[in-house]
Image (cartoon, grey):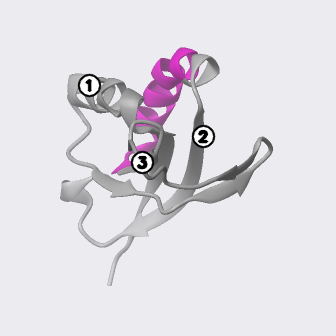
Amino acid sequence: MALHARKKLEITVEKRRLQEVIDLLDRDGEVTGYTILRTLGGRGHTGERLPQPYSDVLDTMVVVTIVKAEVAERLLVALAPLIEEIVGIVAVSDVQVMRPGHF
């Protein structure tokens, strides 16, 4: 079975800024899809972050996409200014996929 190298981007942002990330991915003609996950909380350099009982605006979401290396580079350049200005994390991993035409 042949596997094909791709990059996985995991973009964590506050829910109120999620649409900006989605718009950025949708504008790129080579991003074929993404998955959006709601986080349950976490802890980072600014302390603990838990879902708020009164509003979910500050809850965090994770957008996961798998793309070719050159698309990942382009997305990272486009994401950099956004991530500098907001609460956000971008992680990039090397992955292998079975169906290269889907990514």
The label nearer to you, 3 versus 1, is: 3
Identified at 44% across, 29% down, the residue is: 75
Of the image marks 2 and 3, the number of the one nearer the N terminus: 3
Q: Which residue is mark 3?
A: 61
Separation of residues labelled 1 and 2 (CA atoms): 17 Å
Pinpoint residue 62: horizontal percent, then vertical percent.
43, 50
Disc ID at residue 23: 1
| Amino acid type at mark 1 | Asp
Give the SS element for disc 2.
Answer: strand
Point out the tag, 3 or 1, that comes first from the N-terminus: 1
> Where does the image place residue 50, in percent across and percent down from the top left?
57, 55
Magenta part of the protein: which range? 66-82
Q: Quadrant of residue 2?
A: bottom left
Q: Looking at the image, which residue is at 38% across and 42% down?
A: 55
Residue ID at (46%, 58%): 39
Q: Position of residue 99 (x, y in %)?
A: 23, 67
Q: Secondary structure at mark 1?
A: helix
Q: Quadrant of residue 27?
A: top left
- Pointer 1 local density, CA inside 10 Å: few below 14, some 14–19, many at least 20: few
**Label of residue 89 in the image:** 2
The amino acid at mark 2 is: Ile
Q: Report x, y in % for residue 101.
A: 19, 56
Q: Main secondary structure of the magenta part?
A: helix
**Mark 3: which secondary structure?**
strand
Out of 40 and 78, give the one closest to the viewer. 40
The kind of residue tagged 3 is Met
Left or right, residue 84 beside residue 68? right
Nearer to me, 51 or 91:
51
